[in-house]
Structures are given as C-alpha cells and as structure tokens.
Image: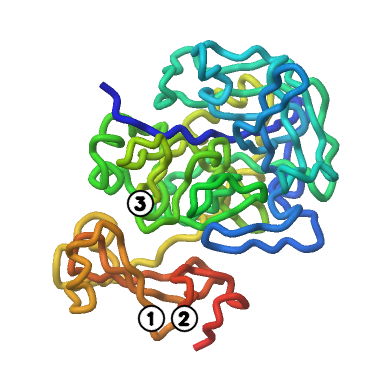
Amino acid sequence: MLPNISAVILIILLSSRTTVQQTPTQCGEKKATRNYMIIGGTDTKPGAWPWHTALFTKKGQTMKYVCGGTLIGTEFVLTAAHCIINVETGSELPPERIAVRLGIYDLNDLSTQQECDIRTIYKPGDFTSDGTKNDIAILKLRQSANLNSYVQPACLGTFSSLTGTYGTVVGWGMTEGYKLTSKLKSAVMPVVSSSTCINSNPDVFGQTLDRTMLCAGYTNGTSVCNGDSGGGLFFKVGNAWYLGGIVSFAAQRDDGSNLCSSESYGAFTNVGAYLSWILEKTGLRLSSTQQPTQAPSTVSHSSGGNVDCGPGCRDFNCHVDRRCVSNVAHRTAVHYPHRDCTKYYTCKERSNVICEFDCPAGLHFNRNRNVCDWSWSAGCTS
C-alpha cells in the first residue's frame, strides 16, 4: 500500500505556437522595475515571478484556489495531473471547471491579474490517480496571455543533471503555523540525489522516485507544503530563468492531520523528462539559443574529509565536530556560521559530523536566520 503522501501541486506552463521560436530574450526574464526576492520562505514582490500562475476550480459563481503554475509562451499551461482531479469523485475535472489567473501576487488582490479559461487538457495516458507517477498535465488556454511587467513566460531547456544545484521554489503554500498565505513566497533549496532522498524516508520516497522525479529541499523546516502544488522549481542560467521541476508531493506529518511535514524533502516532477511530450502537445520549438549554456548555481565541492560522512556530505570537507554532539539525537540538520560569509557549516541530522558548504553564487549566510540570503539582507560582509 502506498504510504501517506501530502499532495502539493505542479506547474503551469504557457508555450508559443510552432511558428514561434523562443529565445532567451523572450522567456525567463523579469520585467518589473523592482524584482526583489527574499530567501528562506518569505514574501516576494509583485512581478518578481511573472510566470507563476494560480489555478482555480469553478463551481457556479465560486472559485477556489487549488494549484500554482508556470507560464510558457502565450497559449499553454503545464500543471500537475492530480490538480485536475476531483478529490471527491476521483474523476478528471472538465476544462470548463478550471480557470487560470496570470500576473497574480496576492490571491486577494486581482488588480494585475488576467483570468483565462481552459480549452483542452492533455495528460500522459499512464498517469496514476495517487499522483506519484506521471504527475503532469498541459492546459490549453482559450485566450492568449497579454505579456507585460506582471505576466511573462518562463524558459524550458535541458540539463544533464540538476543534482547538487540550487533552485528557487515559489508558491502560496502554508507557513510555519500551517496557515495558507495569500502572498506569493519563495525559497532557495538544493536538489539532492535520489539515494539521499530515499534514505531520508524510505517509506515515502522508496516507492515513488524514478528518473521522472527530482528531490529537493532541506529537512530543517524549509520545504514545500500544502498549497505549493503547481509551484515551479526554477534555475537561473545567465539572465534567464528555466523551469526544472514541478512540486508534486511531500511526506505527511506523523499526527495524521494530512498536512505536510516541514522536516521532509519535496518531490518534483522532472520537467526535462517530459520535454519531448510537452513540445509535441504544444507545438513549441526550442531554438538552439534557448538551451542552457551553463550549469545552474552549484554547491562547491571541497576535497578531503577524514570520515565517511555519507551521501550528500562526504564531498564537502566533512569531519566529526564537537558542535554536533548534541545533534546525534536530532532529526533535523543544524546550521552554523562560517568565518567566510559565503560559506556555512551544517551538522547532519542524527550525526556528530559537520560539513562545509558554499552559498549559491552572490549569496551570503544570514547568521540571524541561518539561511543563504542576498548580501544586502544577510548583514555579513567579512
């Protein structure tokens, strides 16, 4: 029997017609004057993620938010297949029961929104109703998006591997107090290997992870949660933002509340694994200049280490450290500042081993919040 999994939705991608070839100047660029982003699961700003969209279900005059998504081009939206399933009946929702709002930052403020109805829904034929396999669907809009400062498409591309890189996830998920936030939030998180993910929770991830999935996040409270479903995992390459993953599910809390666990990695649909299918259904053609030419921000590996620290740590100057002794009994990792603002230490969960990591390029370690942050916000300059 499949373990309890908290569904968290996927991404909505708009794509252009076959006659259009996107270039880096046509996708993945923020047009708003002020494009601030705050690391660590806090509020973004209007226009900071202009490709992120909100998916609603319609019943009479009532609309209910259910998922996030990502705009690609002007006509199509990519989302999780489980987002279009009626949770009461288990059947697929018809297109007329779904609407997408573009350009939205605050779910309670519709001043910059564009509302679009759905014409057609595409999903893989072998999608599993529990949402753990082939959890992806394409929604064709009835009207094209009007691109402006608040509505822009994200890029699609191929990556040889995203493991060890940092992406940014955005969504209207639950806060630390398990209340759904109305304002869009973002958080930077690393993509971890399948073995690291499975070892962290074999009951949940051991039955579900394969090449069509990515695993990302931390086990210290920074993770995806209910309401984040449909939110994208984005990677910056040059000046453009690419969609690499779609939030699919996370482990549930142990209290039977059907809420996500903040101490669990999140599972994402690997967009690259479905790229050919997406291009076939949408007619989008990627020009050669749209393919990423450099890897996303990656954790810098340090050589050495005098103990076998296990997957995800052994290559990062790991060693036994007295600061981590008390962490042997803890289920979550603990972070400590480094004398170099661009680095930080992490005591592994249930371990007396410490590892040395680099923050992503351009970020400094915020010693008050214990996360990598923009240098102007981190308050660390040494």
Query: Which colour style is shown?
Result: rainbow
* Label 3 vs label 2, nearer the camera: 3
Label 1 SS: loop
| Mark linked to residue 263 | 3
> Residue 141's image quarter?
top right
Earlier in the chain: of badge 3 and badge 2, it is 3
Q: Secondary structure at mark 2?
A: loop
Residue 20: image tag: none
Per the image, the residue denoted by label 1 is 338
Cα–Cα span, label 2 and label 1: 6 Å
Three-letter amino acid code at the position of disc 2: Cys
Residue at point 44% right, 44% down?
160
The amino acid type of the residue labelled 3 equals Glu
Q: For residue 352, what is the image quadrant? A: bottom left
Residue identifier under label 2: 341
Asked if residue 23 can be seen in this view, the reply is no
* Residue 315, image x, y percentages: 27, 64
Residue 238 x %, y %: 63, 58
Where 45 sits versus 326, above or below? above
Q: What residue occupies the far left of the structure in this picture?
A: 307
Look at label 1 and name its amino acid. His
